[in-house]
Image: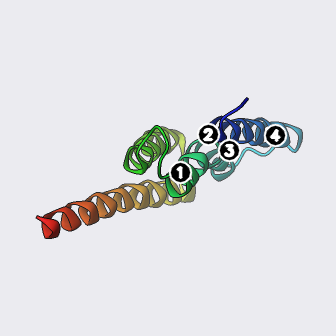
Amino acid sequence: MLSRENRVLAIAAVLFVAGLSIGLILEIEHVLFGVLVVVVIPILGPQLYLAVTDGDGEYAPRTRIRTAALVSLALLLSFLAVADGTDRTILGLLAGGVALGYLCYEGGIGYRRAREA
């Protein structure tokens, strides 16, 4: 029997393949579509969903958020290396937003821990 986590990841894999197929069929070559299909659907979506809804799972929500943010940031930076013009600006803003969001999340956790002590 499949666990809830495996079902979420399997759905993300199916959506990833569907997104790639749609992109190939419609010949979509835009960088932002690639970010949606390669970063948001298979990485950010499932990990953030599981972090929010799976409090007593095998992995702590903080670990899921950290993994999602750092892997997404690495992939966004790789997309940034091949983009130019407006796409490069948008990808830079997305990468900066992920990095800033992650730093704010870690800062908030540190602040709460310091207040408890």
Earlier residue among tags 2 and 4? 2
Mark 3 secondary-structure assignment: helix
Q: Which residue is mark 3?
A: 37
Q: Which residue is mark 4?
A: 18
Earlier residue among tags 4 and 3? 4
Q: Which residue is mark 1?
A: 54
Earlier residue among tags 2 and 3? 2
**In the image, is residue 55 above or below residue 81?**
below
> Label 2 vs label 3: CA separation?
20 Å
Q: Amino acid at mark 1?
A: Asp
Mark 2 secondary-structure assignment: helix
Residue 41 drawn at (x, y percent): 65, 47
**Left or right for 13, reference 101:** right
Q: Residue at x 58, y 54 (%)?
A: 49
Crowding at mark 2 (Cα within 10 Å: few <14, some 14-19, many 20+): some
Say whether marks 1 and 2 touch (CB < 8 Å).
Answer: yes
Residue positioned most to the right = 25
Earlier residue among tags 1 and 4? 4
Q: Amino acid at mark 3?
A: Val
- Quadrant containing the C terminus is bottom left
Task: Compare residues 36 and 102 and report the one nearer the observer.
Answer: 102
Q: Nearer the viewer, mark 3 or mark 1?
A: 1
**Left or right for 43, reference 8:** left
Mark 1 secondary-structure assignment: loop
Residue positioned most to the bottom = 115
